Image (cartoon, helix red, strand yellow):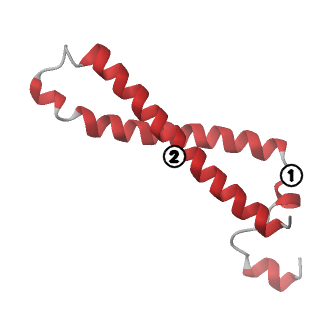
Amino acid sequence: MNKKVNTILFILGATVFNIMITVLSFFLLLILYAKFLMKILPQGAQAWSFPLIFIASLVISFFVYKVVLGFLIKKVDVEKYFDPIINSRYRQKRGE
């Protein structure tokens, strides 16, 4: 496989991973809410719980994605296996 195929596969895999983390964290937060907070909160506050759980799951997924991606970048030589998505005009003019 060449660098472009590796880059496309990495982007697809990272997207699927991010979606899976989002869904898992959403269901985990929903279960925790149903088990602990649903009985305590008043009826008016329960209406805001679903959007807040959704936003919290997105935030959690971005943090997990950032940590995993940072770990992967430390382990793998990115320039060796992946093609840059956006080429810099400065680098092209210098001939690098």
Residue displayed at 40% across by 31% down: 27
Element at label 2? helix
Indicate the quadrant where residue 42 lies: top left
Residue displayed at 82% across by 66% down: 3
Mark 2 belongs to which amino acid?
Answer: Ile
Mark 1 belongs to which amino acid?
Answer: Asp
How far across and how far down the image is residue 77, in percent?
86, 52
Disc 2 target residue: 19
Residue displayed at 29% across by 20% down: 34
User: Relative to 96, does residue 23 appear above or below in the rendering?
Assistant: above
Element at label 1? loop
Q: Nearer the viewer, residue 65 or 32?
A: 32
Disc 1 target residue: 77
10 Å neighbourhood of mark 1: few (<14), some, or many (≥20)? few
User: Relative to 37, does residue 27 appear above or below in the rendering?
Assistant: below
Residue displayed at 76% across by 43% down: 72
Sequence-wise, the earlier of marks 2 and 1 is 2
Query: Where, quadrant-wise, is the N terminus in this rendering?
Result: bottom right
Indicate the quadrant where residue 65 lies: top right
Task: Specify whether 4 is left or right of 27.
Answer: right
Query: Where, quadrant-wise, is the C terminus in this rendering?
Result: bottom right
- The total number of labels drawn is 2
Task: Specify whether 18 is left or right of 39.
Answer: right
How far across and how far down the image is residue 52, in percent?
30, 36
User: Relative to 32, does residue 57 appear above or below in the rendering?
Assistant: below
Task: Specify whether 84 is left or right of 50.
Answer: right
